Amino acid sequence: MIKRQQLPRLRLISQTGFALFCLYSGWQFQQFYLWAMGQRATFVPRPAAVEAFLPISGLVGLKQLLITGIFDPIHPAALTIFMAALIIALLLRKGFCGWICPVGFTSNLAERLMRRLGIVWELPPWLHYPFLSLKYLLLAFFFFIIVIKMDSAALAAFNETPYNLVVDAKMLLFFLEPSSTTLTTLALLTLATLLIRNFWCRYLCPHGALLGLVALFGPLWIWRDNSLCVKCGRCQEKCPASLDVPEKKIIFSPECLGCGECLAACPVDKCLQLTLWQRCVLPVIILPLGVVGIFLLCYAVAVLTGHWQSQVPLSLLKEYYQQAAQLAHP
């Protein structure tokens, strides 16, 4: 039986595994891009997993699926991963953020490093709440543009644009050939992440904001027994979102990652427990097994049903990749 104190180690193993896989997929995609550009003789298959970094394509694909019943043939992996994250959020809070997301993993590593150096800041409340609203404002913008404004005709037109075909290559070029503006932005984000705890995840990620709102409708709550609590504050200290756990009876905030760090940090047995609507206590192993299991199940179903690899012909990708650097968002 897995003990709650082992959750941080399991979480680190899970995040490290997915991060390494993403790095490998990124390298493989670069090799595919070089082949498509005629700079490499040996063919390397395009890894569909790179579409994990195309959540906007996933949202567009989900709306198209709901309206037309058509599963996006251009970026099917993006849609699969997007839906997997939503299912996980509905059942296991923001488990995708807490156990899988490589950006969250990088942020966690930065926090560990800066804690050892004693340089981890928390924004004061008068700054924290305005900054917290930023990711929800970004989410509202994308929701308005995609969910409200784009009808089926607009979705079809966007999907057929050359830009949508090569958006993965645009993402690669963003990192391989960054502009001065890109470098400045990345430098500022890196500095903010090093100084302010989990800056990107807490304040700027619209994908995380969406998953948090979905998680509000989920059954998984963390319940605190006030009669057992010794008010040591370890749960809040370890919480990546710095939630005020010692003052709450039930923790189901949209900022909760479902990571289990608070459960592992609590020194009192049964003071903090994982529950279904506070009615049924669950074993903590539900978190890693559930999150990783649902994600891999969605992947397996997508592969078996032909909804993982893009259906765009390689000859067409080669043609449009030549123009990727010049193509602008429609």
Image (cartoon, helix red, strand yellow):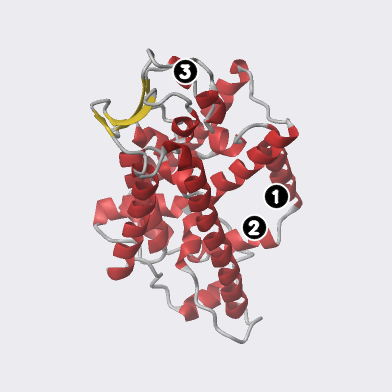
User: Badge 2: few (under 14), some or many (20 or more) residues near its Cα, within 10 Å?
Assistant: some
Q: Which residue is mark 1?
A: 182
Residue at 41 percent across and 53 percent down: it is 58
Residue 204 as seen in the image, left or right of residue 252: right
Of 18 and 281, which appears nearest the observer?
281
Distance between the Cα atoms at labels 3 and 2? 42 Å
Please tell me which residue is depicted at 53% across the width and 18% down the height of the picture: 232
Residue designated by label 2:
174
Give the image location of residue 67, x and y in percent: 26, 51
Q: What's the mark number on residue 226? A: none
Q: Residue at x 49, y 35 (%)?
A: 261
Question: Which amino acid type corresponds to the residue marked 2 in the rendered image?
Answer: Phe
Dot 3 lies on which element?
helix
Q: CA distance from mark 1 to mark 3?
A: 40 Å
Q: Quadrant of residue 219?
A: top left
Q: Is residue 179 left or right of residue 108?
A: right
Q: Give amino acid for label 3.
A: Pro
